[in-house]
Amino acid sequence: MTRIQRGSAPVLIRNNFNCLLCLALVVAAISSAKAAELSPVLIAWLTAQTNIQSWSSDFIQTRRLKSLTQPLTASGHVWFAAPNRFRWELGQPPQTIAVRAPGELLIFYPQLKLVEKFPSKAVKTGLWGDALSLLEAGFPRSRTELEGHYDILSQAVADHVCHLVLQPKSTAARRMIPRLAIDFDTTDFLLRGTELQFTDGSTMRNDFQHAVLNPKVDQQMFVPPVPADYKIVEPLRGR
């Protein structure tokens, strides 16, 4: 395996943050500044999350960019295992595979035979730290765990779906994502959709289909080996 030091593969590195934020939203938690602001449906949603040990779903991702007249769409699949493991595959066959492995985040690019590695210890502070804190939040296990992360800007229920518009409390996170939204079903409390709004006005939405609650998930999915013919990029090496 060939290691590429910081500064290499600039196009991949430039696109990483959007990928991370998209992953973050898949497992985003719901919180508010004050417990009194939580509606009964949010409290019920939070209570239901304690029963989730694993989750998987197909998804359709839609990206809307100001520079394009038509949105970009792609399909994929995501797996989650409590408390904070996930595997996200975008494209069929997968063009990007992101895995929250023990102690690090791995992003694979099979067509390029490249993998980017982000060790947890190197990203505890700053903008990357804020992004990974969203990832590590996982599916919420308690209200206390979540209250410091977001403010709720609006919430509405229609056709058995709760639509939440949130704002990250972290100033650094808001520089990248001023708004994010989460849709969940008010009958089974499963995730229906997520959407990120970036500061340039572009959006990234994920609509989930055929979700399965508590499927049997092979834990080896979250510790994938790096093939011998892949190059390794370490963007945060030396920080």
Image (cartoon, grey):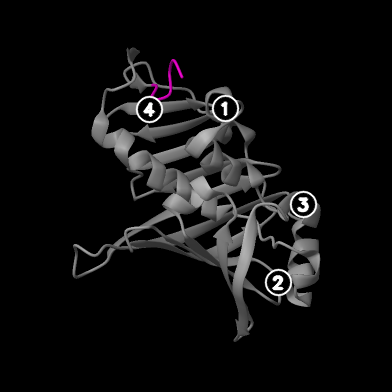
Q: Is residue 160 above or below residue 3?
A: below
Mark in front: 4 vs 1: 1
SS at circle 2:
loop
User: Three-letter amino acid code at disc 1?
Assistant: Ser
Q: Give the residue at mark 1.
A: 120
SS at circle 3:
loop
Q: Disc 3 or 1, which lies upstream in sequence? A: 1
Q: Disc 2 or 1, which lies upstream in sequence? A: 1
Q: Disc 4 or 1, which lies upstream in sequence? A: 4
Q: Are marks 3 and 1 in contact (CB under 8 Å)?
A: no
* Image coordinates for residue 66, horizontal then vertical, percent: 24, 65
Q: Is residue 199 left or right of residue 162?
A: left
Q: What's the residue at 48%, 23% (across, down)?
A: 225
SS at circle 4:
strand
Mark in front: 2 vs 3: 3
Q: Give the residue at mark 3.
A: 141
Q: Disc 2 or 3, which lies upstream in sequence? A: 3
SS at circle 1:
helix
What is the number of the mark on residue 115? 4
* Image coordinates for residue 235, horizontal then vertical, percent: 38, 25
In space, the residues marked 3 and 1 are separated at their CA atoms by 21 Å
Quarter holding residue 74: bottom left
Q: Give the residue at mark 2.
A: 188
* Residue numbers of the magenta segment: 234-239
What crowding class fits label 2: few (fewer than 14 Cα within 10 Å), some (14-19), or many (20 or more)?
few
Quadrant assignment for the N terminus: top left
User: Three-letter amino acid code at disc 4?
Assistant: Val
